[in-house]
Amino acid sequence: MRSAVVRYSPLLLLAIAWEAVPRLGLVDPDTLPPLSAVLRAWIGLLRDGDLAVNGLSSLQNLTAGLVLAIVVGVALGVLMAWYWPVEVLVNPLVRILYPLPRSALIPVMILWFGLGAASKIAAVFLGCLLPVVIGAFNGARGVEQVLIWSARAAGATSLEVLREVVVPAAMPEILAGIRNALALSFILLVAAELLISQRGMGYLISSFGEAGAYDAMFAGVLTVSAVGFFADRLYLLVMGWALRWRG
Amino acid sequence: MARVTALGQAALRWVSILAVLILWQVFAEAHVVSAFLLPSFSTVSVRLYHDVVSGDMILAVALTLYRAFAGFALAAVFGVAIGILIARISVMRWFFDPLVSIGLPMPKIAYLPVFILWFGVFDASKILMVTFSAIFPVIVASWAAADGVEGVLLWSALSLGAGRRQLLWEIALPASMPQIFTGLQVAMPISLIVEIISEMAMGGEGLGGSIMTEMRFADSPGVFSGILAIAIVGAVLVKAMELIRRRLLLWHPEALAG
């Protein structure tokens, strides 16, 4: 407890500075509203439901896109490692598309799917797909042959080997790929919502910014940062739990 | 599981690029979806050619690269400096440790409207947004690298009479180079991604800005030619970083492995 206080005390210092600097008139309170004003605005957003409506919408689109990317990505990655025709067909594509800056896809998704949820889900899905594919591919490719031979010798069918041996052995790299995808999903979703949207946290932040309600804008920014940070920490816990059998 | 040689893989890559482009052309020509949703590859490449010849595309690429590189350079210089200071000075570690552990996984893109409020919508704002997004992986990589420099190297240099400055420039920094470069290789694509998003949000020409304008005018060949250009720029940058790494780390054992 004590060590946690010492560890996080710089954050407390920053919070105090954030409150003091605009109050002392060192910067214009419009440019940086004091932290207390931001917290008041946050409670206001919570009360009138802005946070619930937009937060829920963002969370839904994020989850839908990410889950889709995980399911398709793991299947594709494992198949690539398992059947060489799939590798020959898909691997070069993955390598070509991997360096494509994924934010470039947002305008096309809006052209294709309009301003609503579908374009956000598609942007998150496409942006997150490749890290998952690459994680699953590398993981499944690195499975020791001995494990596969033993399973075969014990009478396992192809599908059983895949499900019982290859996927669990590839799990650490699959989970690491998904962690990259999780970080990307926030970037893509918030960017898409900031640019063109009628709902979601990104929309909330940018519309308060345009309206000059800077305390509410900062409240939205802090909320997104906190959710992104805690999602990563939570994921690390889940990852540790899922891999506990490895010792 | 087939193991293909390096040459075969390179050939395969070009064959598969070609296959995708042909598929794109055939699919678009078949008019399964309208030409607005998916203009054919030939339409898009003719458009790209015209944009390059007229100079618009060259200007856009130059603007985007200028801001992305400026932001990246700031992130590299300050990120490496902060990372090494964190590893060496305990007050720096106390102050930056919680900030870095929160800043690294946090979606920095949400701060875009804050940067607009503080720095406006012109170059400074975009460059600083890129720096803010790209600096965390550089700090973490340099910190880990400087922490991991083998004591034996430092002791040997000390016993040979090296000063503090020499220790930093001639031993600690080169020994940390591979890991620092890995951080820079993570930061480079982030810089390009964030620069493009910032242009999309703030306007001001560049690849992201012009795609957004073309989208608003429902100019779909323009949007697709912009994406083609972004894909090429992204691929070239990633490749360039790999080549620079190989060149810079020629002396390092890792160069022998590859």
Image (cartoon, rainbow, N blue to C red):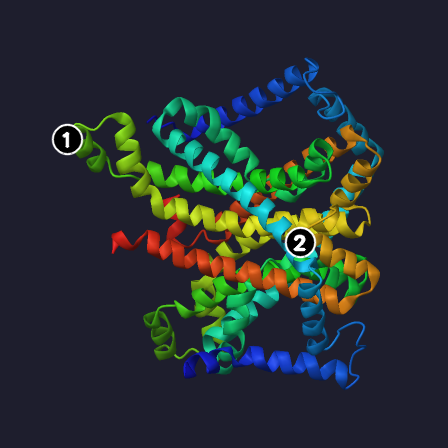
Q: Badge 1: how crowded within 10 Å, few (<14), some, or many (20+)?
A: few
In the displayed structure, A13 sits above or below B14; it is below
Give x and y (percent) for residue A182. Answer: 51, 50
Which SS class for mark 2?
A: helix
Which SS class for mark 1?
A: loop
Foreground pick, B236 / A216 = A216
Q: Badge 2: how crowded within 10 Å, few (<14), some, or many (20+)?
A: some
Give x and y (percent) for residue B36. Answer: 76, 25
Residue B119 visible, this orientation: yes
Residue position for label 2: A53
In the displayed structure, B3 sits above or below A192; it is above
Looking at the picture, which amino acid does disc 1 mark? Ala
- Of all residues, the one furthest to the left in this rendering is A154
Looking at the picture, which amino acid does disc 2 mark? Val
Relative horizontal placement of residue B56, taking residue A94 as reference (left or right): right
Subunit bearing disc 1: A
Give x and y (percent) for residue B128. Answer: 70, 62
Nearest-to-viewer mark from 1 and 2: 2
Foreground pick, B134 / A148 = A148
* Marks 1,2: beta carbons within 8 A: no
Residue depicted at 74% across the width and 26% down the height: B44
Instruction: Report how far apart the C-alphas of labels 1 and 2 lie in the structure.
Output: 54 Å
How many labels sit on residues?
2
Give x and y (percent) for residue B57. Answer: 78, 37
Subunit bearing disc 2: A
Q: Which mark is residue A154?
A: 1
Q: Quadrant of the N terminus of chain B?
A: top left
Residue A101 visible, this orientation: no
Q: Quadrant of the C terminus of chain B?
A: top left
Foreground pick, A213 / B182 = A213
